[in-house]
């Protein structure tokens, strides 16, 4: 059985590009669509480079759940949020129960919830004085960052850590682990 994955993203899209590259030529898992809620996001160029279809959606389509129509059209079986900053509508959470995966750039349950996105997360971690951070890969439910955790990896924070260094080290972890965890989860090998 082929699993069709739609990626949701809002901005730069370096994880999207990494995931597209990882699954190129894979017979079991196909990246069929990139959904983006920002028409100027660089992720759109990245997807076009690899000839993956894109769909720009409005906030209204997200809020009222009509984004589901695009997923139906592409026979989407799973959704992966890779740098997506909005809440997923209830109809999708229900229809794709246990089939929506998100990555968060910190060790949940800390530094999660509404407003915690990208650099905001890293700034909060650095301000807190914590000595570690990391990545969390989890399933998506009705609430921001509250679904079941399927993978975490931590790193220690260096005494001279900056926003740039932390963000780059976290991205490296994401590139290394996210595609393989997606693959294992979808193929029931986790
Ligand atoms: C990634 O670090 C991802 O974990 C984070 O946004 C970044 C997007 O980078 N996601 C969240 O903060 C979700 N709350 P990218 O656009 O270069 O992949």
Image (tube, rainbow, N blue to C red):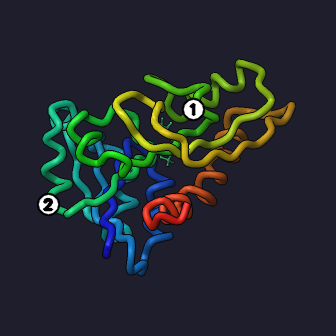
**Residue 142 image-quadrant placement:** top left
Q: How busy is the neighbourhood of tag 1: few (under 14 within 10 Å), some, or many (20 plus)?
A: some
Q: Is residue 15 visible?
A: yes
Q: Which residue is drawn at 48% across and 24% down?
A: 113
Q: The N terminus is located in which quarter?
A: bottom left
* Secondary structure of residue under mark 2: helix
Viewer-closest of 147 and 166: 147
Q: Where is residue 141 in the image (x, y as percent from the top left)?
A: 37, 35
Asked whether disc 2 touches disc 1, contact meaning CB atoms under 8 Å apart, the reply is no
According to the picture, the residue beneath numbered tag 1 turns out to be 119
Q: Which residue is drawn at 50% across and 43% down?
A: 138
Q: Which residue is drawn at 17% across and 47% down?
A: 68
**Residue 105 image-quadrant placement:** top right
| Mark sitting on residue 136 | none
**Extreme residue toward the right, this view:** 159
According to the picture, the residue beneath numbered tag 2 turns out to be 73
Q: Is residue 138 above or below residue 51?
A: above
Q: Is residue 48 visible?
A: no
Report whether 132 appears left or right of 114: right
Viewer-closest of 157 and 92: 92
Q: The C terminus is located in which quarter?
A: bottom right
Q: Where is residue 4 in the image (x, y as percent from the top left)?
A: 30, 65
Report whether 168 appears left or right of 51: right
Task: Please identify, in this view, whether the residue under mark 2 or under mark 1 is nearer the observer.
Answer: 2
Q: Which residue is drawn at 72% across and 18% down?
A: 128
Cα distance between the residues tagged 2 and 1: 34 Å
Label 2 CB sits under 8 Å from any ligand 1 atom: no
Q: How busy is the neighbourhood of tag 2: few (under 14 within 10 Å), some, or many (20 plus)?
A: few
Task: State which tag comes first along the sequence, 2 or 1.
Answer: 2
Counting labels gives 2
Q: Where is residue 30 in the image (x, y as percent from the top left)?
A: 35, 70
* Secondary structure of residue under mark 1: helix
């Amino acid at each position: 059985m082929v699993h069709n994955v739609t990626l949701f993203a809002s901005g730069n899209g370096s994880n999207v590009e990494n995931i597209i590259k990882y699954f190129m030529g894979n017979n079991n898992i196909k990246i069929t669509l990139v959904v983006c809620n920002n028409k100027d996001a660089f992720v759109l160029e990245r997807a076009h480079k690899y000839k993956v279809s894109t769909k720009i959606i409005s906030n209204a389509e997200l809020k009222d759940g009509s984004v589901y129509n695009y997923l139906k059209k592409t026979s989407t079986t799973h959704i992966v949020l890779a740098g997506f900053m909005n809440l997923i509508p209830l109809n999708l959470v229900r229809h794709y129960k246990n089939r929506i995966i998100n990555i968060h750039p910190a060790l949940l349950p800390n530094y999660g919830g509404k407003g915690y996105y990208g650099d905001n997360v890293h700034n909060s971690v650095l301000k807190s004085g914590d000595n570690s951070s990391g990545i969390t890969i989890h399933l998506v439910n009705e609430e921001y960052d509250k679904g079941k955790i399927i993978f975490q990896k931590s790193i220690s924070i260096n005494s001279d850590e900056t926003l740039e260094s932390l963000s780059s080290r976290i991205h490296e972890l994401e590139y290394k682990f996210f595609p393989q965890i997606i693959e294992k989860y979808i193929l029931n090998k986790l």
